[in-house]
Image (spheres, rainbow, N blue to C red):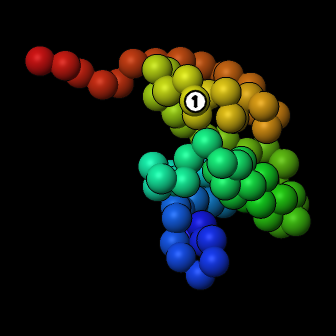
Amino acid sequence: MVELNEKIIGKICIEYTDSSAYIFGFGILPDFRGKGYGRAALLAAIRMCHQNNFYDIELDVACKNNTALNLYTSCGFELQSAMNYYCTH
């Protein structure tokens, strides 16, 4: 959980495999976005991965989520592949 003054403002999960870490379920409540809490949470998750000797860290994000894409690239992530997996009717 991502907490601020003992209040939950978001969440981030890490799953470890044999050779890599996978970040998923990452989100910050709307009222707390744009204030650096997401960046702080992501950097803390990356540090936790490194402390556990995982340096190959992966995550998924919707191609159209430019805010998240900018956050991830500014924290050192690189685009490996892109696919559309949402359908509209």
> Which residue is pictured at 53% across the width and 76% down the height?
7
Image: 45 above or below 72: below
> Which residue is pictured at 74% across the width and 55% down the height?
40
Quadrant of the rendering where the C terminus is positioned? top left
> Which residue is pictured at 52% across the width and 61% down the height?
10
Badge 1 marks a residue whose secondary structure is helix
Residue 25 appears in the figure = no
Residue 82 appears in the figure = yes
Taking the view exactly as shown, the residue that stands out farthest to the left is 89
* Rendered location of residue 53, percent (x, y): 87, 60
Quadrant of the rendering where the N terminus is positioned? bottom right
Q: Which residue is mark 1?
A: 67
Q: Quadrant of residue 70?
A: top right
* Rendered location of residue 35, percent (x, y): 66, 48
Q: Is 84 or 32 nearer to us in this picture?
A: 32
> Which residue is pictured at 48% across the width and 53% down the height?
31
